Image (tube, rainbow, N blue to C red):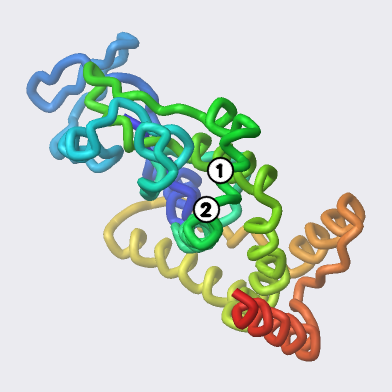
């Protein structure tokens, strides 16, 4: 089953103080208080076992659509039947977001545009878009229906569709500036660092009160480090973003442009 590994501060902190250990293997069998793994290792003194990772799709969805594969976002390659989900897995090379919001927004924009302008897709179809889109077929033995595709499938589909339909891609042209302003308005750097540091320390205090004996681990990030990240990013990309976010007038300009774009849609 596809799953996502922990990426929150508490996960890294728990590993740092020795409270958590990650073991990557397949469970072969269980005996009393012991997990026997396929790799030969035994995990002993296990009193609680929680299966909390991964998901299994429902084959009823495939049967309802009478399909055994999803092509891009489309049931059996039929662009009039788009299907979308919070894709499984994780692409660690691209931490654009930790939620479905950005991907879902792009998906809705793209498919609404195609429904409003069907000739656009018909031209894309003539140009061979369906042959280039990733295909996800049902894997019965692995309990994986066709409609449950992973995040790499989603990313590849977006890249191909937006490159072959630039007018739809234009609908997201202001997103980077919008996100840049939004993040810093809602979560300014100093506020974020303060709350992260307080949470980090509170976890350690709670564990100490519960009897966990470990040396205190200072919060690993500082404003100076983050300023360095921004400087390196700007140098490599030619951008001019700042740790404290855009100027107020820049935010108002992006907001105005976004409103105009929505009116044009």
Quarter of the picture holding the C terminus? bottom right
As drawn, 207 above or below 29: below
Mark 2 sits on what residue?
118
Q: How many badges with numbers are in the image?
A: 2
Q: Is residue 86 visible?
A: yes
Q: Position of residue 156 (x, y in %)?
A: 58, 37
Q: Position of residue 195 (x, y in %)?
A: 53, 75
Q: Is residue 18 visible?
A: no
Residue sitting nearer the eye, 3 or 155: 155
Residue under the point 68% across and 77% down: 181
Q: Position of residue 17 (x, y in %)?
A: 46, 47
Residue under the point 88% across and 67% down: 240
Mark 2: few/some/many CA within 10 Å (<14, 14-19, 20+): some
Query: In the shown orientation, is residue 24 left or right of residue 30?
Result: right
Q: Position of residue 141 (x, y in %)?
A: 22, 16
Question: Alpha-carbon distance for marks 2 and 1?
Answer: 6 Å
Residue sitting nearer the eye, 205 or 167: 167
Residue sitting nearer the eye, 250 or 95: 250
Residue under the point 50% across and 46% down: 16
Residue under the point 49% across and 64% down: 200
Residues tagged 2 and 1 counted as in contact (Cβ below 8 A): yes
Quarter of image, res 67: top left
As drawn, 25 above or below 10: above
Mark 1 sits on what residue?
122
Which element is circle 2 on?
helix
Query: In the shown orientation, is residue 183 left or right of residue 257?
Result: left
Quarter of the picture holding the N terminus? top left
As drawn, 205 above or below 8: below
Query: In the shown orientation, is residue 140 left or right of residue 124?
Result: left
Residue sitting nearer the eye, 67 or 59: 67
Which element is circle 1 on?
helix
Mark 1: few/some/many CA within 10 Å (<14, 14-19, 20+): some
């Amino acid at each position: 089953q596809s799953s996502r590994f922990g990426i929150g501060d508490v996960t890294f902190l728990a590993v740092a103080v020795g409270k958590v250990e990650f073991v990557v293997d397949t469970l072969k069998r269980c005996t009393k208080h012991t997990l026997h793994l396929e790799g030969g290792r035994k995990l002993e003194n296990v009193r609680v076992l929680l299966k909390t990772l991964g998901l299994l799709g429902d084959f009823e969805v495939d049967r309802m659509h009478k399909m055994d594969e999803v092509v891009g976002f489309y049931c059996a390659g039929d662009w009039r039947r788009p299907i979308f989900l919070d894709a499984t897995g994780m692409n660690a090379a691209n931490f654009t977001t930790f939620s479905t919001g950005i991907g879902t927004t792009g998906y809705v924009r793209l498919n609404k545009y195609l429904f409003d302008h069907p000739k656009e897709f018909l031209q894309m179809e003539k140009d061979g878009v369906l042959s280039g889109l990733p295909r996800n077929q049902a894997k019965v033995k692995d309990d994986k229906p066709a409609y449950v595709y992973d995040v790499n499938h989603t990313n590849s589909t977006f890249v191909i569709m937006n490159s072959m339909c630039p007018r739809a891609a234009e609908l997201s042209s202001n997103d980077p500036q919008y996100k840049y302003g939004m993040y810093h308005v809602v979560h300014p750097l100093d506020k974020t660092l303060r709350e992260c540091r307080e949470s980090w320390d509170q976890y350690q205090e709670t564990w100490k009160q519960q009897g966990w004996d470990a040396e205190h681990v200072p919060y690993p990030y500082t404003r100076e480090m983050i300023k360095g990240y921004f400087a390196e990013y700007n140098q490599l990309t030619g951008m001019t973003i700042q740790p404290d976010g855009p100027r107020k007038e820049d935010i108002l300009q992006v907001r105005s442009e976004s409103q105009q774009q929505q009116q044009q849609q």
